[in-house]
Image (cartoon, rainbow, N blue to C red):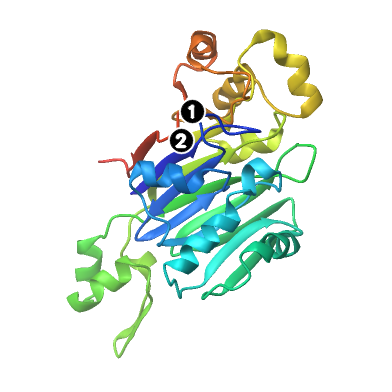
Amino acid sequence: MIDVCLLGTGGMMPLPYRWLTSLMVRYNGHSILIDCGEGTQIAMKEKGWSANPIDMICFTHFHADHISGLPGMLLTMGNAERKEPLTLVGPKGLTRVVAALKTIAPELPFEIKFIEITEPDQEFELDGLRFKAFRVNHNVICYGYTLTLDRVGRFQVEKAEALHIDRRYWSRLQKGETIETEQGTFTPEMVLGEARKGIKLTYCTDTRPTKSIVENAKDSDLFICEGMYGEPDKQQKAVEHKHMTFQEAAELAKQANVGEMWLTHYSPSLPKPDPYMDDVKKIFPRAYAGKDGKSVELRFEEE
């Protein structure tokens, strides 16, 4: 199971009813942020979630509305006497950018580790949750992220019994371990069925539509995508500033065959996205206007 919460859905500047861009994901005792705009801590408090268990913060790019909340977040973690390392992930230059922001948070009681994304596609992992950063098309280097939680096949009791595998090893094999015994070596593939459908989440913002988005979002259970502009007359502005319209995001969701799409990263000139959603749903019926605090539990399919 993965908990997902849109903490902030605003782009460019915060509004009284809309914080800047941030997504929080909780999985197996871990918490991950994607982007940390101004107001992220307040949005987190409003949701009732805590910054203390955050293990990783991923950044799509280094525009202020996506990273301006980081110094305060680091100070809050430090004031809570955090000791565990924090991993920061982002485009090349991340270490330099964070060093500059840390001038107002110079002394922290925990280590910061860095993963700089230097390739068009780059993968990493946190306790079985697989991440893939993929390059998109903004006016600075920018990445989208997919998070995938795989699900192994069912344990085949009859196979384990036929191989005379001691029951004390069954759970370890199911978790992916290889077991060495006097009777021989037993691998998970010997007792597990075909892999089952896992959970896939894709997050993408600040970009024009690209082939990479469709490829990486393909068959996602949830696709969270920028919808900077809902108004039909903002198409040219979206092109000039390398953002997306609601309709363009819906086309991507349709092409990628996702389970559900949430729009986010609205322009300050767009006070309410709802009036434009009817046209969006004509393109992709399972599209929804994201709102601060909107959340869902993504679960494995029941069989």
Please tell me which residue lies in front, 33 or 14: 14
Residue at image point 74% right, 50% down: 120
Tag 1 residue:
261
Residue at image point 19% right, 70% down: 161
Q: Looking at the rendered structure, which numbered label has been put on residue 128?
A: none
Please tell me which residue lies in front, 33 or 45: 45
Q: Quadrant of residue 157?
A: bottom left
Q: Is residue 14 above or below residue 230?
A: below
Q: Counting other residues with Cα less than 10 Å from the Cα at mark 2, is it few (<14), some (14-19), or many (20 or more)?
A: many
Q: Is residue 115 above or below residue 194?
A: below
Instruction: Point out residue 169 in the picture as x, y percentages from the top left corner.
Output: 25, 76
Residue at image point 71% right, 65% down: 99
Instruction: Point out residue 145 in the picture as x, y percentages from the top left corner.
Output: 59, 46
Q: Label 2 amino acid?
A: Leu
Instruction: Point out residue 79 in the picture as x, y percentages from the top left corner.
Output: 46, 67
Instruction: Point out residue 4 in the picture as x, y percentages from the top left corner.
Output: 41, 43
Q: Secondary structure at mark 2?
A: strand
Q: Label 1 amino acid?
A: Met
- The answer to whether marks 2 and 1 mark residues whose Cβ atoms lie closer than 8 Å is yes
Tag 2 residue:
222
The C terminus - image quarter: top left
